[in-house]
Image: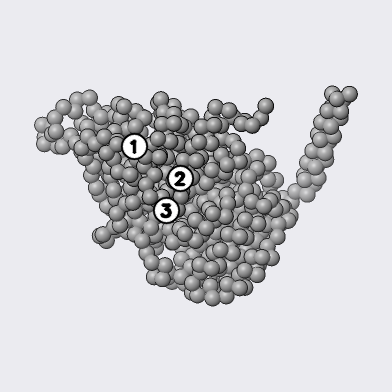
């Protein structure tokens, strides 16, 4: 009797699913949206029902003689860390491809020195023994963007492009987004401007570009946002850019901010067309940032690509605390660019280095010739932003003297060249540094380096990286606990708690289930 009941129940569920699918298919609108001034065509397609992540193939060891240069663009996105937190808090291990180690490292604050010269950021380098690989040294490169007081920042011209399709009705999507935007209205200056464009079937301007002095009108528009309907974002993004360009001034900070669960149905059938539009508007001075929300149908890979091509940031908002971090606490670094197309190129000294490996930044690696190519897009830095990169380095076995026959220092492991552009410039500026290894042990390294290493270790454990060696969650927790420091906002203590959760799930993938 029980088996019969189960069979009938399963059959009913399958029948309902088929009927639902048929209903969805009958409502698909293959609308082609085209702005008269554009040549790009966007096609609306059905949303997917699963979360999507781009595959990550970890950087491997490279021979310093064969590949003396290592080139990559900076990454100031932080979405991966908060998304990993969401997985762990909800009771499961994250998808391995959701773990971008550089974004986890860059989620946290570091105590790098402020720039003191004409450049908009400082460069800090440090080398110590590697805590998970006794044969290797660990090198850290840290960038610190210049802090700029809010009152002297250029006026903001923000257009929020809000997904109000039916998939956004969950409590952790549109309702959380509305709370986030309400907080933002309290941070605006009188000369800042905000507009809101929505998309769900048809695009609409629900709030004309409004000065910060009229926050009440903004809050009324936000309060009236409701989810419902199918998703068709092509007209929405074009309208958002149109509004941004109409309200841009010579000195304004112009940005479209896409708020969605990623079910943004433009670019699945013509992703290149969407990228071309974003790049064109980027070159006209309107950047694109992305705020991701929700679970289930979350499209991480697509949103990261959009933000990267738009010279903007990508953040994942999993709770109201994260919303405050992104839109209030770190507003200047999130939304105000002080340097764009920031690239790093390390030149390794093969007399001192046998092999090296860049930890993370897999989707930011550039060809060596891209470094001097000013047409090649790269990452951007905001006011006060910090960027940290780590390398594992195997010293050369022949390194027995402090100088070689030509007088070159063998302690000099590598030089670091950086290129960046001013926010509205087309020509890059070069900044060069060099690094020496003074045989520092890891326990003597700075708190900055020890904490960054603990986060990298956490990421390698979550990815089950082949490079983690004998590292365990217990080892990572010891690293993190010993380098937590002052932690005024509690972000580091939170990661240590997440380490405990991950350790539990790693032993029992489904804790609590019998």
Element carrying mark 3: loop
Question: Marks 1 and 3, Cα distance to the nearest angstrom?
Answer: 28 Å
Question: Count the marks: how many?
Answer: 3
Marks 1 and 2, the one that precedes in the sequence = 1
Marks 3 and 2, the one that precedes in the sequence = 3
The answer to whether any part of residue 359 appears in the image is no
Q: Nearer the viewer, mark 1 or mark 2?
A: 2
Q: 162 above or below 63? A: below
For label 1, the residue is 391
Question: Marks 3 and 2, Cα distance to the nearest angstrom?
Answer: 10 Å
Question: Image quarter for residue 445?
Answer: top left
Q: 329 above or below 221? A: above
* Label 2 packing within 10 angstroms: few (<14), some (14-19), many (20+): some
Question: Residue 280, position in %: x, y?
Answer: 50, 58
State the residue at coordinates (82%, 39%).
Answer: 16
Q: Nearer the viewer, mark 1 or mark 3?
A: 3
Question: Residue 54, position in %: x, y?
Answer: 54, 39
Q: Is residue 435 left or right of residue 105?
A: left
For label 2, the residue is 493
In the rendered image, the quadrant that contains the C terminus is: top right
């Amino acid at each position: 009797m029980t088996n019969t009941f189960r069979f009938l129940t399963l059959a009913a569920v399958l029948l309902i699913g088929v009927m639902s699918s048929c209903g969805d298919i009958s409502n698909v609108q293959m609308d082609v949206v085209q702005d008269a001034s554009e040549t790009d065509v966007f096609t609306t397609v059905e949303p997917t029902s699963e979360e999507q992540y781009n595959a990550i193939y970890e950087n491997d060891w490279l021979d310093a003689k064969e590949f003396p240069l290592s080139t990559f663009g900076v990454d100031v996105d932080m979405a991966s860390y908060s998304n990993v937190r969401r997985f762990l808090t909800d009771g499961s291990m994250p998808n391995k491809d959701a773990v971008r180690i550089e974004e986890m490292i860059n989620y946290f604050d570091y105590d790098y020195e402020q720039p003191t010269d004409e450049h908009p950021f400082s460069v800090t380098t440090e080398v110590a023994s590697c805590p998970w690989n006794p044969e290797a040294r660990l090198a850290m490169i840290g960038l610190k963007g210049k802090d700029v007081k809010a009152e002297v920042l250029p006026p903001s011209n923000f257009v929020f492009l809000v997904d109000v399709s039916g998939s956004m009705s969950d409590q952790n999507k549109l309702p959380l987004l509305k709370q986030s935007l309400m907080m933002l209205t309290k941070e605006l200056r009188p000369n800042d401007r905000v507009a809101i464009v929505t998309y769900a079937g048809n695009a609409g301007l629900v709030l004309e570009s409004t000065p910060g002095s009229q926050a009440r009108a903004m809050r009324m528009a936000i309060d009236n946002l409701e989810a419902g309907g199918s998703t068709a974002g092509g007209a929405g993004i074009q309208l958002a850019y149109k509004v941004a360009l109409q309200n841009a001034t010579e000195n304004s900070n112009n940005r479209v901010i896409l708020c969605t669960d990623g079910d943004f149905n433009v670019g699945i059938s013509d992703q290149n067309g969407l990228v071309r539009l974003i790049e064109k508007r980027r070159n006209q001075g309107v950047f694109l940032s992305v705020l991701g929300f929700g679970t289930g149908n979350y499209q991480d890979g697509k949103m990261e690509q959009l933000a990267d091509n738009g010279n903007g940031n990508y953040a994942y908002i999993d709770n109201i605390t994260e919303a405050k971090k992104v839109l209030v606490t770190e507003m200047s670094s999130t939304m105000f660019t002080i340097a764009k197309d920031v690239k790093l190129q390390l030149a390794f000294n093969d007399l001192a280095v046998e092999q090296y490996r860049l930890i993370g930044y897999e989707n930011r690696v550039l060809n060596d010739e891209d470094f001097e190519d000013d047409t090649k897009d790269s990452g951007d830095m905001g006011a006060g932003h910090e960027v940290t990169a780590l390398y594992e380095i195997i010293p050369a076995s022949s390194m027995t003297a402090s100088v070689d026959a030509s007088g070159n220092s063998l302690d000099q492991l590598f030089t670091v060249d950086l290129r960046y552009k001013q926010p509205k410039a087309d020509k890059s500026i070069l900044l060069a540094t060099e690094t020496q290894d003074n045989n520092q042990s890891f326990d003597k390294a700075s708190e900055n380096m020890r904490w960054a290493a603990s986060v990298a270790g956490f990421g390698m454990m979550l990815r089950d990286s082949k490079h983690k060696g004998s590292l365990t969650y217990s080892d990572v927790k010891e690293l993190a606990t010993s380098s937590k420091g002052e932690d005024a906002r509690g972000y580091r203590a939170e990661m240590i708690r997440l380490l405990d959760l991950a350790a539990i799930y790693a032993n029992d993938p489904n804790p609590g289930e019998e």
